[in-house]
Image (spheres, helix red, strand yellow):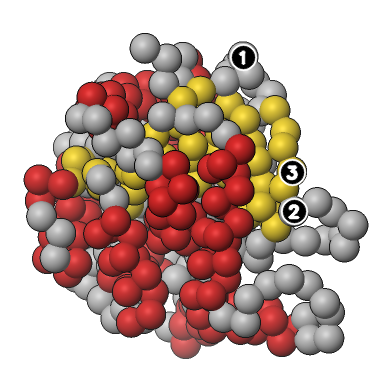
């Protein structure tokens, strides 16, 4: 049976700011290889008052026309908060754009516009990624009667390190309650949904993220050749610079490492609302000369950075999964993972620390940097671990969920 999926998300390559866009790309590409037809719906900010409300383009790649992208005019952007949405509206004061006056209202407006797409498209199931698109999934279900699957990549408890915004929490909970099935990216995320949102565990299926191995492991020039040539070691942080990702814990661990070995360079790659705070912290700790803030990095430069690093550290306070952990291992980079990260459910040959235990983190960093045999063992076994984690496997499990929903007569 050929399955047709109406999928809602809020970012997709080439415009990507975080892991969800890469996850959506990897998943939909593998679904297309399995003959699943996907109509992927995205919000697109209005840049020209003459633009149509809906845009349709064909996805170019190896999908053979099985992936179709449609856009709805909306200001929903990746990792929006109520505050950042309000700031954007202030900058647009006096401009007659058709956006709602609050983030929650914009999410619901986007959902209402999604009804038109649901009425226009033919599909068997609805698949919505994270809370910004849950409202669209609900409206599509209401007008079509098709089953709704919501895919949780992160909850409000993860994004805020346990201090959720009540309005966002309620909107998120509404989507989880309306769903016919919930896909969680880890058992850790499933536990959060059960504990904090009151959802029955039987409604939740755990499907881990994957990796496209053809995009990794390539021999590329080392953009940090000069640093490496000086005999310095490189420790990498790669991700959004937000409270969830633990950049402050990374820098405090860096301070302890540098007290013992000043010949280490710490790279912070990414951007986010804690970027300036992190730069100030590095200065206050007296380690600025050993810390490089690169800003956001994507594409081949991302792969070069992983390959240059002697160790990748993911000190996340709450990480539902963490695709960058897989990317590091696929490029032969040893991994130090926080015990609060879901990626630890699929890879075992890594070092682990609690995000808050910067002394333990520093000890493990020094251990890897000081032992060639430990570094090589972690690299070789980690690469072996990650080779069996693929987007094709993830897509296959999603297809089983689609078939189950259809077989139950929910459509």
Mark 3 surroundings: few (<14), some (14-19) or many (≥20) residues within 10 A: some
Q: Nearer the viewer, residue 162 or 356?
A: 162
- Count residues near mark 2 (Cα–Cα under 10 Å), then give few for <14, some for 14-19, many for 20+: some
Would residue 281 be found to the left or right of residue 224 on screen? left
Image: 211 above or below 223: above
Q: Which mark is residue 64?
A: 1
Q: Is residue 132 visible?
A: yes
Return the x and y of residue 158 as percentages of the image width and height.
30, 66
Circle 2 residue = 53
Query: Disc 2 to disc 3, how far (Cα)?
Result: 7 Å
- The answer to whether one can see residue 263 in this image is no
* Residue in view at x 51 percent, y 49 percent: 9
The tag earlier along the polypeptide, 2 or 1, is 2
User: In this figure, which residue is indicated by the disc labeled 3?
Assistant: 55
CA distance for labels 1 and 3? 20 Å
The N terminus lies in quadrant? top left
Label 3 residue SS: strand
Where residue 40 appears, x then y in whole percent? Answer: 56, 38
Q: Nearer the viewer, mark 1 or mark 3?
A: 3
At a point 42% along the width and 15% down the height, the residue shown is 2
Gap in Å between the C-alphas at discs 2 and 1? 26 Å
Q: Quadrant of the C terminus?
A: top left
């Amino acid at each position: 049976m050929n399955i047709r999926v109406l999928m809602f998300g809020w970012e997709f390559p080439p415009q990507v700011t975080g892991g969800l866009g890469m996850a959506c790309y990897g998943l939909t590409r593998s679904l297309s290889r399995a003959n699943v037809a996907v109509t992927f719906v995205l919000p697109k900010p209005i840049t020209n008052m003459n633009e149509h409300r809906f845009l349709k383009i064909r996805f170019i790649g190896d999908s053979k026309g099985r992936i179709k992208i449609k856009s709805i005019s909306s200001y929903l952007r990746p990792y929006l908060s109520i505050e950042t949405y309000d700031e954007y509206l202030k900058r647009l004061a006096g401009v007659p754009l058709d956006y709602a006056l609050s983030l929650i209202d914009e999410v619901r407006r986007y959902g209402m516009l999604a009804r038109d797409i649901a009425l226009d498209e033919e599909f068997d199931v609805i698949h919505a990624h994270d809370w910004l698109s849950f409202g669209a999934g609900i409206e599509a279900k209401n007008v079509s009667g098709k089953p709704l699957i919501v895919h949780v990549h992160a909850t409000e408890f993860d994004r805020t390190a346990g201090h959720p915004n009540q309005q966002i929490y309620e909107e998120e909970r509404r989507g989880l309650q309306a769903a016919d099935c919930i896909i969680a990216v880890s058992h850790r995320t499933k536990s959060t949904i059960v504990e904090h949102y009151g959802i029955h565990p039987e409604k939740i299926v755990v499907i881990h993220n994957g990796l496209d191995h053809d995009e990794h492991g390539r021999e590329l020039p080392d953009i940090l050749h000069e640093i490496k040539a000086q005999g310095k070691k490189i420790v990498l942080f790669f991700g959004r610079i937000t409270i969830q990702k633990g950049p402050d814990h990374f820098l405090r661990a860096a301070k302890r490492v540098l007290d013992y070995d000043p010949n280490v360079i710490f790279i912070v790659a990414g951007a986010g609302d804690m970027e300036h705070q992190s730069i100030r912290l590095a200065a206050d700790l007296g380690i600025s000369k050993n810390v490089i803030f690169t800003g956001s990095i994507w594409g081949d430069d991302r792969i070069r950075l992983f390959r240059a690093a002697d160790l990748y550290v993911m000190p996340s306070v709450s990480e539902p999964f963490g695709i960058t952990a897989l990317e590091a291992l696929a490029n032969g980079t040893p991994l130090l993972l926080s015990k609060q990260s879901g990626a630890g459910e699929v890879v075992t040959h890594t070092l682990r620390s609690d995000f808050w235990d910067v002394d333990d983190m520093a000890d493990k960093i020094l251990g890897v940097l000081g032992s060639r045999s430990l570094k090589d063992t972690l690299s070789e076994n980690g690469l072996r671990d990650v080779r069996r984690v693929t987007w094709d496997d993830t897509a296959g499990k999603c297809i089983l969920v689609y078939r189950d929903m259809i077989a139950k007569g929910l459509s």
